[in-house]
Image (cartoon, grey):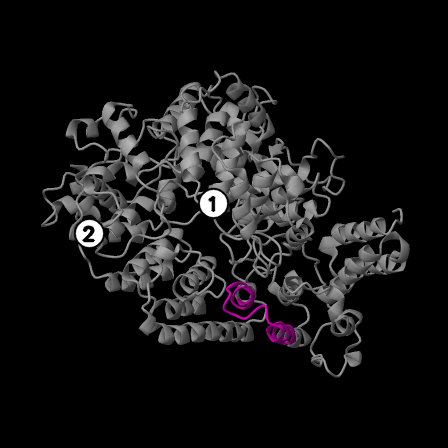
Amino acid sequence: MAQNGATEKEQELLVRQTVMYLYRSAKFLPSPYVAEDSSRMSLAYFCLSALALLPSEAVSSIDPSLAGVDVMLKPEQRKGYVDWVYRLQAPGGGFMGSDSLAGTERGDEEERSLPTPIPLDDKEAADFARLMAFPDSDDEDPPHGEGSALPSASTAESTYCPPNLIQSYTALLILGILNDDFTRLNRAGLLRFVARCQMDDGSFAQFPGCPEPGDPRSTYSAFAMSSILDDWTAVDVDRALHFLETCQRPEGGFATRPFAEPQGGFTYCSIACYHLSSRLASFPNSARHLRWLVDRQVRPPPRSADDVSDEESDDEEQSEQGEPKDMAGFQGRSGKDTDACYSFWMTAALRLLRPDLSLLQPELDQRWLLECQHKMYGGIAREPGALPDVYHTYLSLAALSLSVTPSPSSAPIASASPSISLPLRPLDPAWNVSLDIAERMRTALAALPKLELDG
Amino acid sequence: MASASAAQEDSYLPFSQRPGWEDLQPIPQADAPNALVPIAYTEHYRDAMDTFRALVAKGEKSPRAIEVTEQLIRMNPGHYSIWAYRAETLLATNADLSKELDLMDELVKEHIKSYQVWQHRRTIVTSLQSSTRELPFTTRALSFDSKNYHTWAYRQWVLCHFFSSQTTPAPLSERKATSSAEEDGDEKKRKSVWQEELEYTRELLEKDVRNNSAWNHRFFVVFESGEGGGEEKEVVEREIRYTKTLLSLAPNNPSAWNYLRGILSHSHLPLSSLTPFVTPLALNTPASMPADEPPVSDKAELPAVGAVEWLADAGAEEAEKEGTEGGREKGVEAAALFRSLIQFDPIRTNYWQFRADEVLQKVGIAV
């Protein structure tokens, strides 16, 4: 393997390789992604949102002020992608994660062979009405053999490819990144869908009737969409925050459900909900959570002998001779190893609680994340030596962007290493998309006619 | 057809050419021409999905559906629709659900991080209304991966759903009804399950005293489940003693310090109530550990960051209580302790400085 090289020079963000890696991924993903087949919307968001953070300079001389996503996508490609997203808009509102079940809704052979955009015909409307009338199930299915609340075969089809809160949230951001005007967005339907996902305990199921209990990820998606649409009528904020409060843990941080172990992703989602709903003033146990977040920055584990070259032995990594590169990433839970994705979850959470990242050491994290890059293929992996993927690539770039971008209310970050150049666009840490895209989305959505609320 | 030649190449026989499947017309994926992130499906996955779509379109709940969904979840354990259809088919065909659990036992080894594998197990177990396999099963899973998040969440669900008398995370109507004749036996069983659970966390911590998942679970069992007697004074004392003993052996253990903080916060006790135990670990004076506290191990690396932080926080707590009048001295002391942490924990340099400044400000000293 080609090692060395990068460790001798000062590190840099491999902009060109990373842009190409993301562009390739948006067009085609290798077979290991089969396991994410039902969440392709999120995979697409990781690719495009990353291209919106990266500059275009390394791949194009058209206009250095453009982002990677602006120069990489041809107009017809952009339009085709927008059409794909809208094809996954459910008839009654909300977005599905993929079309892997498309074609199963209608029994009709001819329609099946025609991959046309989903029409809102009478049959679809009737399916939707049935879906909406279907009572929310609770956590479990009824006992075996008894009158099942599960849909019967004749009504079941539409429930196999339901819209989903997380996928809907990422769909909105993709549309924003692709500069869509949102005129095809079924806003009223989306809000109705969000409202129907909220459960009695305040949590949100990923879709009505989803057997999996809700966790802070789906609450976050519901809040982020309410914030993006600037319409909070679909969510009961008090009940939703009450659920999040029950997910707090004594050591600090938030868990997937009450009593479980606190973890970085759920903690970010929870804190972002307080931010998005302008309730940070009543954020509970703030000092405890702050301490928990700051405690998660740790040194990476020494790399195993397989991962390092002969000259660069294990001993050397840890000992006095040949001082190892000073870096520190983030762990997702106490006592776990560093993983590149937690650089985002932890720093973004902290950034929402405080005006800047001055309590952390952003430059130590920058060195760690740059070390996780794949020198040849581009992309960023969960740890050095692992294969990159679009999830870790995006979240690492988002973390790097936060680490170099001062928030509007604070001075530039003094501790950021001047020797590392990170030409990334500023990120909105609550919506999780570049600030300029967020701004453009606000403008586009505000230009739409006001929603008429029907009974 | 292309599928026939592909089949020859890797000797894969598509479902539609297998005996008993000829009547099904596979439905290819209707992807848009400009789809984002199309995935390079393997021939096996594509064929099984095409077949699955055909079954779903027909609404066919049959042994065939059980077969094809098994193939699919082995390749893609993350697809909600496949699991949902499988669960419905199993219930509709009165399939042997204990066999399904055998399959889940096997699949979880490879797909332990898939949300759906665990949710499916929950669906099956709820339908079976039997928990007998579940705790031993999660114990086995945790023996491979003692910090696996899904396994722990599932174990807590099993405990709450089947063995809790007080907390009712699941609606009452869905919990197993017991007749009064059963109750005594059940009550005994229930109590022993929670007793064993406490013992289980002790065993795990004996193997790895820094297993934060085990500490978190212990807190749940003792103080949050309503089954651990967490309000009683002797339970609180027992847990404090237990944690102190483990800290005196390995004082650089953030999980144990956090557990101790959790107990005090739960019992509304000030941090300073443990100062006699914490001070020797913070000041590297193990010989001065009071006789009624657990003795410090020779191998303990001192001073322990968790102990210094504890003393600093305890001082800050008291300084804040006394305010700008009497708290100045304690505030200055706490600030010095926070700053002393910088040399032992340089990653958090800025945080320790922030904590020092914060406590000084609270007692009215300008920084």
Q: Is residue A206 left or right of residue B295?
A: left
Residue A450 shown left or right of residue B334 in the figure: left
Considering every residue shown, the one lying at the far bottom of the view is B291
Q: Is residue A58 above or below residue B272?
A: above
The residue tagged 1 is A203
Residue drawn at x 26%, y 35% is B29
* Residue A454 percent across, percent down from the top left: 41, 22
Residues at marks 2 and 1 on the same chain: no
Label 2 packing within 10 angstroms: few (<14), some (14-19), many (20+): some
Numbered disc 1: what chain? A
What residue is drawn where x is 43% and y is 23%? A78
Task: State the residue at coordinates (65%, 72%).
Answer: B240
Mark 1 residue type: Ser
Per the model, the C-alpha gap separating discs 2 and 1 is: 30 Å
What is the span of residues highlighted in magenta in the rendered image? B218-241
Q: Is residue A265 visible?
A: no
The kind of secondary structure element at disc 1 is: loop
Q: Which residue is mark 2?
A: B92
Q: Is residue B237 magenta?
A: yes
